[in-house]
Image (spheres, rainbow, N blue to C red):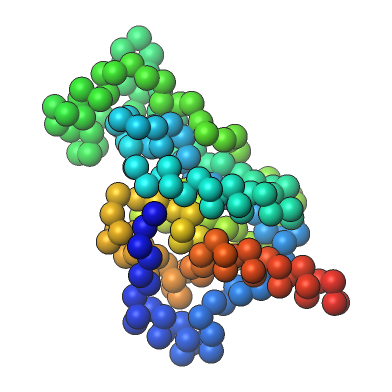
């Protein structure tokens, strides 16, 4: 699991701006959805081309969020790239520099089907709008690539966005924390799994009292 360390400067800016550390400290469960990014074998399975080992560590926290009754009715999986091989041909982005080099070429040639997923796949915006969703909890991999891209896009589409810090994974703590620090206070909120579950609980209490 990543050692999470949000930039003190980002924490200070949020506290000064909002008077609190979490702008979305209360989440209305009926309007929230868990968005799980790229938990597919291409990134999660041992020894594969795109392996992010820490992605395996976040599965329990993703499952905790998915089991939470209200948002768990609407868990979504977003597969940012569909990785698959056909008759030895790579269906991918062969000009990307991170696919270069003999070691990665050997991994590309091992014949696995990279399309197989750990969970279901939805294309999500219309699905979310149709169900009155206005808040997204972002989990999955990689924190600083597809998860960050999805989180920023969601904010620009006027969703309230929480990146769940211990339900996200990438290659290093430095990359993970740089993304969370940059996102926090500029685009949305960053919470741990426990904090997100508590925010959902507060939303239940607030709704019941209304």
Q: Is residue 203 above or below residue 66?
A: below
Q: Residue furthest top?
A: 87
Q: Residue 165: x percent and y percent? A: 46, 61
Out of 133 and 33, give the one closest to the viewer. Answer: 33
Which of the 4 image quadrants contains residue 98? top left
Which of the 4 image quadrants contains residue 136? bottom right
Look at 35% across and 32% down and name the residue there: 46
Q: Residue 166: x percent and y percent? A: 46, 58
Counting every numbered tag in the picture gives 0
Look at 41% across and 80% down and name the residue there: 11
Out of 170 and 76, give the one closest to the viewer. Answer: 170
Is residue 174 left or right of 83 when viewed as pictured?
A: left
For residue 142, say whether it is visible.
no
For residue 57, say whether it is visible.
yes
Q: Is residue 164 above or below residue 83?
A: below
Look at 75% across and 59% down and name the residue there: 30
Q: Residue furthest left?
A: 102
Q: Residue 160: x percent and y percent? A: 59, 66
Q: Residue 112: x percent and y percent? A: 37, 19
């Amino acid at each position: 699991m990543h050692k999470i360390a949000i930039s003190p400067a980002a924490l200070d800016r949020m506290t000064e701006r909002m008077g609190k550390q979490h702008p979305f400290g209360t989440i209305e469960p009926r309007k929230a959805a868990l968005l799980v990014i790229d938990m597919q074998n291409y990134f999660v399975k041992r020894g594969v081309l795109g392996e992010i080992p820490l992605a395996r560590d976040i599965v329990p926290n993703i499952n905790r969020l998915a089991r939470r009754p209200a948002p768990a009715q609407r868990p979504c999986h977003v597969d940012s790239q569909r990785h698959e091989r056909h008759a030895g041909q790579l269906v991918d982005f062969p000009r990307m520099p991170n696919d270069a080099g003999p070691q990665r070429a050997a991994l590309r040639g091992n014949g696995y089907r990279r399309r197989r997923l750990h969970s279901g796949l939805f294309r999500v915006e219309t699905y979310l709008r149709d169900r009155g969703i206005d808040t997204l909890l972002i989990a999955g991999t990689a924190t600083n690539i597809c998860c960050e891209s999805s989180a920023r896009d969601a904010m620009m589409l006027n969703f309230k966005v929480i990146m769940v810090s211990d339900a996200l994974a990438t290659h290093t703590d430095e990359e993970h924390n740089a993304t969370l620090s940059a996102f926090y206070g500029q685009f949305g909120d960053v919470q741990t799994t426990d904090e997100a579950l508590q925010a959902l609980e507060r939303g239940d209490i607030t709704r019941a009292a209304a």
